[in-house]
Amino acid sequence: MELKKRPRVLFLAYSFPPITAVASVRTWNIATQLAKLGWDVTVVTVDPSIRRDVGDPENVSTDLDRTGIKLILTGHRWRFLWASGLKCWNQSLGWLIGGVCRILARILGIDRHIGWIKEAERACSNLCPKDVDVILATGSPFVAFRLARSLSDRLGRPYVLDYRDPWTANPHHGDRALRPATIREEASLLQGCAAVTIVSPSWGADLDRRYGVGVKTHVITNGYDSNEITTIKPQDFGHCAIVYTGNFYPPRRIISPFLTVLQCLKGSSGKANAEWYFHYYGGEGNHVSEQAAQLDLNDRIVLHGKVPRHEALSAVKGASLAVVIVSIEEQASSDMAGMVPAKIFEAIGLGTPVLLIAPNGSDATTVTTSTGLVKSFTASDTHGMALYVRSVIRGEAPKSENIDAFSWQRISRNLDAVLRQTVPSNDHAKLVGQQRESE
């Protein structure tokens, strides 16, 4: 008897393990969970040998063999446009020439990842329609979306766009003027796609408002991998540890409001002034130390620098409190309302209480409230934050509820349903039947 064919997804993921970029967390979970749900997954990604941010390739190779995920590794042209991420001639004269080219590229609005498209098309040139049922592209970088349409046109297969961040409404782009051509391209790509997934409700609503995407939009949040979480051992700090991991984005995401809270605690008496320290894991220690010096807090600050992912997760698991900052704005602007830092879900999965600093109306607050672990404050509510931190120091930690809703094992089922619905109608009934049998 002929074996039933698994549905096939071609996943365009610029960053994928062993690349250590934060984007790889989402792409890895999407690929592995879809494979577990019965998909034949082929990932198109940049060859790690030309990336600078590479982790442990041997462990990744073992996991890929176990899950059956196939890779198509690509080259990359014009690597000098992203010299910090791609290996290239970037010394002496190379640094000078590359720097001039990068400045020109920014002026002309050329994406620094543009050199990936032709190399990825070449790497996929042997694919034919029978090899693919649907194409899934994740961005940023958004050249992946352009690549998805190109492959869709050649293979005659639908493409789905996964937004990890907004493209033309990115809150971290500041006041940078948008090029009309970029807006037109985004509109065209959205019009031609079969479905859109995006990480938060507000960003989905904004995409619909600007481009009329309508029912094609589906919210697929970030989450935590329950299998990964169970392998993490808590860091033994030996004291009440308050932990922040990751980057800042001045002036909207800065540490000073929370350090002001710690200054209040340091000056208080009683049990709230027991042994506690603020631990920062990330590459912006100067920002933390400079702000701490102004508030006479350096004796309560521990800077760990950039560390491997498992070490950061161990710190969060061993912490009494994790701090997550969306923005210090009081009211959520349209571009910040949908900002939900992915690390908040990992803290939830690890069972660590979270102090969230977010504007009123932020999705980060509304999406995570049901977990019981997240307490949200605006940046100006120094008094409220101080009371909450004191309660944590006293051992009055909140209890977790309904955290399974944010496991990738649960989230991936929603993505699975979206992808199956995009398969051409003559194959759809067959794939639905396969899905029911697998369940």
Image (spheres, rainbow, N blue to C red):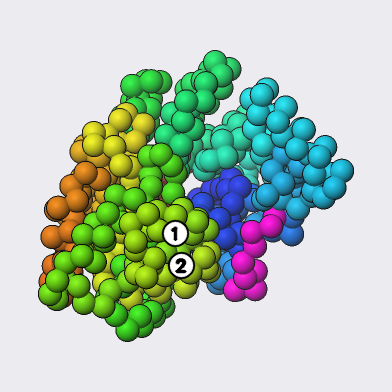
Q: CA distance from mark 2 to mark 1?
A: 8 Å
Start and end of the magenta stretch? 51-59
- Seen in the picture, residue 351 relative to 430 is either above or below; the reply is below
Report the residue at 14% width, 53% height from top.
384
Amino acid type assigned to the residue bearing label 1 in the image: Ser
- Seen in the picture, residue 123 relative to 393 is either above or below; the reply is above
Magenta part, dominant SS: loop
The image quadrant where one finds the C terminus is: bottom left
Q: Are marks 2 and 1 in contact (CB under 8 Å)?
A: yes
Residue that carries the numbered disc 2 in the rendered image: 303
The quadrant where residue 145 appears: top right
Report the residue at 38% width, 27% height from top.
207
Report the residue at 71% width, 50% height from top.
86
Q: Position of residue 313 (x, y in %)?
A: 41, 69
Residue that carries the numbered disc 1 in the rendered image: 289
Q: Position of residue 17 (x, y in %)?
A: 58, 61
The residue lying toward the viewer, choosing from 139 and 429, is 139
Report the residue at 13% width, 60% height from top.
387
Q: Secondary structure at mark 2?
A: strand
- Seen from this angle, which residue lies furthest right? 93
Residue 56 covered by magenta stretch = yes
- Seen from this angle, which residue lies furthest top? 180
